[in-house]
Amino acid sequence: MRDALRDPANQVSPRARSLWFAEAVIVTALLVGGLVLLSMWMTGWEFLPQWLLDRTWVVALVLGLLMVPFVLAEPVVRFAVHRWELAADVVYARSGWLSRKWVFVPVSRIQTVDKAQGWLERFFGLATVEIRTASYAGSSTIKGLDYEVAARLAEELSRRAQELRDDAT
Amino acid sequence: MSLPFHEPVPEAARLSPRLLLIDPIRVLPSLLVPLAGVLVAGGFSPRSFIWAAFGVAGSVLYAVVRWATFSYTITGGRLELSRAFIGRSTRVIPLERIRGVDVTTPFLHRLLGLAVLKLDTGAGGEKQEGELDGITVEEAERLRAVLLARHAGVTGAPGVAGQPLEQAAAAPRDHVFLRVPPAWLRYGPLSGAFLFTPFALVAGAVGLAFQWGGELGLDEDDAVAVGSWLWGHPLLLVGVAVALVVLMPFLGAAMYAVFNWNFVLFGRGDHLVAERGLINRRVVSLERRRIRGYEIAESPLERQAKVARLWAVVTGLGDSQTRGQLLPVAPRAAVGDIAAEAVGPFSEALRPHPPAARRRRLFRAIAPWLVLALVLYALGQTIIGIIATVLAVAGIALGLDRYRSLGHTYDGTRLSVRSGSLRRAQAVVERRAVVGWTIEQSWFQRRAGLVTVIAGVGAGSGGYKAIDAGETQAAAFAAEVTPEWMAPFLKR
């Protein structure tokens, strides 16, 4: 898409990297923890080869090691990819990591604007702006914004949306 | 009550008392097993008959009370449905929120001249919508006219409120687009879905046997015994399977005919009305100013026979797959004519997607079966492996056809996208229905320089995809349809 579309103007907050890192660590910890529990139970699985039965914890270890590069890369890549912009009454947002997503939402078609903050986001002083239209494919979620920025954006969007509102869906 | 004097004083109406003849019959099947249980358990003693009679009387009484405590009123631009049974509840539906009225006549209702009227309020959730189950057909017609006339603003003129309603009620079919000839029913089984009717019937029977079996004292052991007995008679099993396969086209055709009997599409006022069905007559009204486009779908068999199916893309219509249907399986030429006449003409040729898209379609159609085949061979499961190999080979044709299906275009008013092979679907949607764009690119698509561009539409399925378009092509497409939104973000 590099030849077709320009990058959205604004980066998300640098603290979003910490948020994504924390989320990735939590998910990995849950996965590895689950596998550790499973490996305790696996000792009774006769059909597995003996060398694996003797040390079932290997499975959890291997998965944990495999996840390390992803956990380290995800925050960096996301920080480079996630960008947003409000120009000419259109919200333009890019997101993704292994896959990419570009969303264009004209303010005139916005139905609701929500500002959300989960407990981890609150810890890092971040917030998410959710923009909804009548269609899932015209709706956008901008994550990792600085709380102040998110509040201002949500405020401005709902004000402009009211001014421009046209019910042409 | 300070109603304007010219408006007729609203009177709360009830459902037709004839409903009382239907209601007990409808609850009978669910009552049958417990009743039989009571009789069997009581050894058919006089006492057990008394208990059974109590059960029947109770269900009749329940139906009477339900009927007596429900009423509906149209007053001050609102439809009020109130039920005062144990609790008291009133649902108020503002008339301007009613987007469509759907009248059906299930079999028993039809015998007694009754109908079910369903309101579409565009709220989406099932619970939000209103239903009047068991009014006379005439009342349904009258209500339909009143509810929809209000909405269209026909009664806007003050002082004559009563009159336009009467006129609207008598509004004739002002234009019949098409009355489907009986000969077209033969195309039905080509759509594929109805071919599985025999299997669906068997599955239903088995399900019912399990559900009732438990109450009649049969348990899992009996089921296992039946299963192993069948397993011991493979010829019987094969015979049943062959019979089911042979029955596929016939039962499928019969089922299709029952649902789509005497399909009529006509205009009435500012509505498009589709009527169909042999046993349950179903009438769906679609408000024309909410129609934003149409969708045409074809299976490979249907393409061979040059037939297709047609749906309208309507804003705020729940369950649009069944309710939006404009035509059953019909000749392609007729589908094109009706789509052009009822919705709008569209003849722009589709633009193909880049060759990289063909590689991706082929890979996705072949690779999974090939991998499966190799794994099966490695495990020594040769016979299933051969089946997987055959499917992989068939994937070549499927992948190529899927690529040929891909395309998108824009003619200045409507955009169109097409994809799929076993169900090739082309959507044609008005530009003004677009509420935004999403461009998606998976990791594999990025390697191939492709994207999927989705036009967000506040109607129909919500989004219409142009799958595996080129990167520049996709951005150019969105910019062509809505230049004012996309221009600031394009690279020159």
Image (spheres, rainbow, N blue to C red):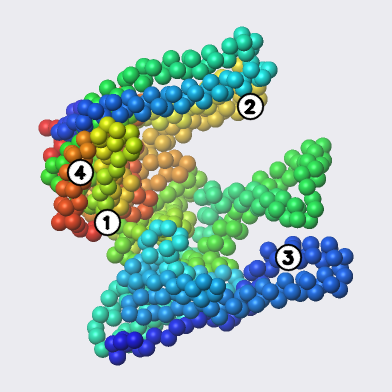
Residue B327: image quadrant is bottom left
In-front residue for pair B410/B321: B321
Question: Residue B250: in sight, yes or no?
Answer: no
Q: Which residue is mark 4?
A: A151
| Labels 3 & 2 near each other (Cβ < 8 A) | no
- The residue at which mark 1 appears reads as A169
Does the CB distance between marks 3 and 4 fall below 8 Å?
A: no
How far across and how far down the image is residue A113, in percent?
25, 49
User: In the visual, does B450 lie left or right of A4?
Assistant: right
Evaluate if marks 4 and 1 touch, with contact meaning CB atoms under 8 Å apart: no
How busy is the neighbourhood of tag 3: few (under 14 within 10 Å), some, or many (20 plus)? few
Q: Is residue B388 above or below residue A68?
A: below
Work out whether disc 3 and disc 2 sit on a shared chain. Answer: yes
How many angstroms separate mark 3 from mark 4 (CA)? Answer: 61 Å
**Marks 2 and 1: CB-CB under 8 Å?**
no
| Residue type indicated by callout 4 | Ala
C-beta proximity under 8 Å, tags 3 and 1: no
Q: Which residue position holds label 2?
A: B384
For discs 2 and 4, the disc positioned in front in the rendered view? 4
Q: Position of residue A22 (x, y in %)?
A: 34, 26
How far is disc 3 from disc 2 in space, using C-alphas? Answer: 45 Å
> In the image, residue A99 lies at what x, y percent?
33, 29
Task: Point out the tag, 3 or 2, that comes first from the N-terminus.
Answer: 3
Residue on which disc 3 sits: B32
Give the structural element (helix, strand or loop) at label 3: helix
Which label sits in the foreground, 2 or 1?
1
Real-space Cα separation, disc 3 to disc 1, in angstroms = 50 Å
